[in-house]
Structure formats: structure tokens, C-alpha cells
Amino acid sequence: LNRDTIGNGHVSRNIRLALLAAEMVEPYVSIVAVNKLALTDDIVPLVQRAPKSCMDTKAVMVAKNAKEVDIEWTVGGSMTVDETKLWYAKWDEVAGAVDCWTHPSDTSGFQKAKIYRGVQNGTGFFSVHGSHPSPKDSLTGALPTNGPLFRGTIPLEGMKQGDKIMVLASARVDKSWKKQPSNIAPKMLPQSHIVNARTNPDYHHESNGKHIHGRIDWFAIPLTVVIGDFDDSLGTRDEDLVNTIELHPRFGDHTSTKGGVRPKGAKQDQLGFPVALWLYLVIILLILTMAFCTIRFCCHGNNGRTLLKDGEDFDEGSDDFIFEVKPYSDDMVTDANSNYDDDDDDDDGIEIPKIT
């Protein structure tokens, strides 16, 4: 995806072009992180979309004594992010006007959240300048998105245990596309779907039962923040306190994932493996080791020798004391020496003269 890498040829450019065509079909906004917790993906195939299902499928819990919560979101499907905002309200106060899967018609009943450093605009991943603000600045320490990453803070003063807060992120994008340059003729309004869909709220087109509705404000799937029943944290993960947890696995009852990042509680270690199970494995390993050593000692402790107890006599005829011929003996040495014969046929050796 990076155009600055070595080997950036026709194939790489065409792949990016295809991805860009799919990306630009429609603008979108997505909440990707809460505090230091990176959320799991919003797009899950075959999940039923009930009007209020996101209250369960996209929800986090925070400590009841938390003063505020940090929210990170991204904006995609556009080149320029002209303006983005973060909204929040109690679910009970806006549940009748907003559901999970349709864009709200207005934001009455919501309050604006404080935007980090006041940054409310930027550029998309496929723009000339790339993603801005950079996703590398995420509080999660990871890269929750390739697109621009915005951050806001929601105050929790006055909230009590069990309260559910709906959080929405919105954006307006690519408004410059509807402005016709002065040197272009004839003077007329934008004609393409891609421009009208994101700049003209009155635009509507229908073809073969498919509808395109224009809009200016684009909203994320609501995030639900639940005020929990715990103080400070639920445990640790690495060296950080876990004060935010994801409540519901995105894949429903599917057992292949539990969704989100879980804390390391009192009964789990850094790998998320129960300490009790580790203890059982260690005990079993020790028992097996001791058993192996005991058996080996009993079988080989005497090195094949029979020990005599006090008062017992040695019986030469006993079969217990029959030994095999040693692999090296004087006989074998004699046999070996016999194989080295002198070339001289005289076997008398060297004659030593007598000394008179």
C-alpha cells in the first residue's frame, strides 16, 4: 500500500487503484479505540442487524470512578476530512431517535465532546499527503487503522453505575468537489454520483431498485460506554492497568474469538493462561520426573552386581556369579601379537654374545 517502497511498479499501482475505487464508493466513520483498548472490527459477515443490537455488539465497560474516557476514531472513503466531531448522550435520552444502522437526521439531544488539540480536519489515506492526523499517535500503542486518527474526550462526571452512554463520531468530507473551477465550461452542478452523494443532501437517484441518497454528515456505528461496577481496574496487561474492557464478542456465539483485548485478572498470567492449569502441569511434570528417576535407580543402581549380606557365604557354583569373557584379555593380546610376524624366517631372534 505504500507508494514510497522499492519495487513500486505497475502491479502495485493497479492494486492501489482497485482498492481506491472500492474505498471511495461511500464515506464512512468508525470508532476504533477506547482509552488504550483497540476495538475489534465493525464489519462481521452474517451478523443480524437489529435496530439496537450495537448496544451489545459494540460496547465497552469502564471503571465507575473514571473521570473521563478517551475515544479514537477514523474517517475513510474520502480524500479530505473537512470537519469531524464527537457526540455523546445517554441511551435512554436518545434511543427513540437513533438506532444502530441508520444515520441520525440530527444531533439534537447530544453533547459535543472535547477534541484532542482541537484537530477536527485532515486528509485520507489515499490523498497526496497520506493519513493526517497520523494513526501512529494512537494511545493503544498499536495501529488501529491506516486512515487518519482523531481523538476526543468524554467527561463522566455525574454518571452512575449501570449508565449506558451512546457515543457517535461524525464527519463532513470532500466539500471542495462541488466547486467548479472558473476556467471550466459550461457552468453546471456536479453530475456524478460520487460527488453528489457526499455534498448534496437533496440528491437522490434510483436504478434497478438501488438508491443513492446524498448527505453531508456521515456517522459511525454508535459505541456504548457502560459505567461498570469496579474501581480503577480489573487487572493488568503487561505493565498497564486495565480500566476498559470490551463487553461482547463481535462474532456472537462463535467460539473462534472472544473479541477485543481482555485484562489479565488475578487468575491469569500474561499469556492469558490460567495459573491453576500451569500449576497442575508443573506438578504432573515433577511426579513423572521423580518416577523416572526412581525406576532408573532401582534398575541400574547396582550395575548388575549381586551384593552379599552379612553372614552369607560365596557359592562358586551359583549362576548369579557367572560372567562373560571380558572384551579385552591377555589371550586377545597374545593373539594379536601373533599376527605380527617378522619377514625373516629365522625365529631364533637376535643372538647376544657372551661376555667373558
Image (tube, rainbow, N blue to C red):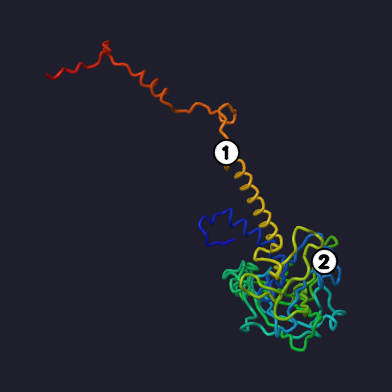
Mark yes or no: residue 165 visible: yes
Seen at 58% across and 56% down, the residue is 12
Answer few, some or many: residues within 10 Å of disc 1's Cα (few below 14, many 20 plus, some between 14 and 19).
few
Name the outermost residue toward the right.
Answer: 96
- The answer to which quarter of the image holds residue 148 is bottom right
- The answer to which quarter of the image holds residue 107 is bottom right
Seen at 53% across and 27% down, the residue is 324
Mark 1 lies on a secondary structure that is loop
Q: Is residue 195 left or right of residue 11?
A: right
Name the outermost residue toward the left.
Answer: 356
Q: Nearer the viewer, mark 1 or mark 2?
A: 1
Seen at 28% across and 14% down, the residue is 343
Report if the CB atoms under discs 1 and 2 are less than 8 Å apart. Answer: no
Answer few, some or many: residues within 10 Å of disc 2's Cα (few below 14, many 20 plus, some between 14 and 19).
few
Q: CA distance from mark 1 to mark 2?
A: 102 Å
What x and y, as percent, mark residue 235? 69, 73
Residue labelled with disc 1: 308
Q: Amino acid at mark 1?
A: Leu
What x and y, as percent, mark residue 339? 36, 18
Residue 292 shows which numbered tag? none
**The C terminus is located in which quarter?**
top left
Question: Along the line of sight, which residue is nearer the eye, 313 or 226?
Answer: 313
Question: Along the line of sight, which residue is nearer the eye, 261 or 140?
Answer: 261
Name the outermost residue toward the front.
Answer: 311
- The answer to which quarter of the image holds residue 344 is top left
What x and y, as percent, mark residue 268? 69, 66
Question: Along the line of sight, which residue is nearer the eye, 99 or 286?
Answer: 286
Residue labelled with disc 2: 211
Instruction: Establish if 181 lies above or below 337.
Output: below
**The N terminus is located in which quarter?**
bottom right
Seen at 62% across and 59% down, the residue is 16
